[in-house]
């Protein structure tokens, strides 16, 4: 029996909508990363980009479990001497919840040119409005909503 290898011409890309209301950040990020890489398809091939497009709506309503909202920090460096900056997730989720989700998903994708290409198919919106109705996206329900 031969192993199937997907070819770029064989790939059909779909569009999916994920509603992130009351779902933990990591749970949304891991499921979205699987869709972007194509691991939810039977034709998944590690060295070929088989992933789909993902639209995440209501990123303002994402939740962090435990004390992560208070304890977790996002660190980055400006490039200047002494330029290490730190932002708490309480402030980040209040102001830029879409960036927090993008950072989480990007960390779960491959650190190669393939991963950077897959990341370009992610679209995150803070509210329920998006401008991709023409692509006729399918809705995906992620289990694990918090009350």
Image (cartoon, rainbow, N blue to C red):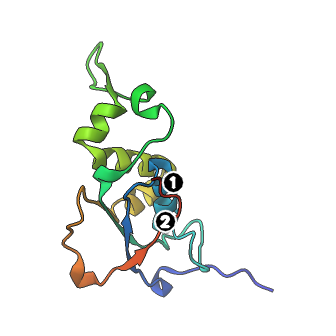
Q: Which residue of the protein is positioned furthest toward the top in this rendering?
A: 82
Question: In the image, what residue occupies the spot 59% across and 74% down?
Answer: 44
Report the disc number at residue 142: 2
Q: Is residue 117 above or below residue 24?
A: below
Residue at x 33% of width, y 33% of height: 90
State the residue at coordinates (39%, 76%).
139
Write down the quadrant of residue 93 in the picture: top left
Work out whether 115 lies above or below 18.
above
Q: Residue at x 44, y 55 (%)?
A: 23
Between 99 and 65, the one lying in front of the other is: 65
Q: In the displayed image of the protein, which residue is found farthest to the right?
A: 1
Circles 2 and 1: CB atoms closer than 8 Å: yes
Q: Quadrant of the N terminus?
A: bottom right
Q: Is mark 1 on a helix, strand or loop?
A: helix
- Counting from the top left corner in percent of width and height, residue 11 is at 47, 83
Q: Distance between the residues labelled 2 and 1?
A: 8 Å
Q: Nearer the viewer, residue 50 or 19?
A: 19
| The disc label shown at residue 27, or none | 1
- Find residue 137 and report its horizontal and vertical position in percent: 33, 80
């Amino acid at each position: 029996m031969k192993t199937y290898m997907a070819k770029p011409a064989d790939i059909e890309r779909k569009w999916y909508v994920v509603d992130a209301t009351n779902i933990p950040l990591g749970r949304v990020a891991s499921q979205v990363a699987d869709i972007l890489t194509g691991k939810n398809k039977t034709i998944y091939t590690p060295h070929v980009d088989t992933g789909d497009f993902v639209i995440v709506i209501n990123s303002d309503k994402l939740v962090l479990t435990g004390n992560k909202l208070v304890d977790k920090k996002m660190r980055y460096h400006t490039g200047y001497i002494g330029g290490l900056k730190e932002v708490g997730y309480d402030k980040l989720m209040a102001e830029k919840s879409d960036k927090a989700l993008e950072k989480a998903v990007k960390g779960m994708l491959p650190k190669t040119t393939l991963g950077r290409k897959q990341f370009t198919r992610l679209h995150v919106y803070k509210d329920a409005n998006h401008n991709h109705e023409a692509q006729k996206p399918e809705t995906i329900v992620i289990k694990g909503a918090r009350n």
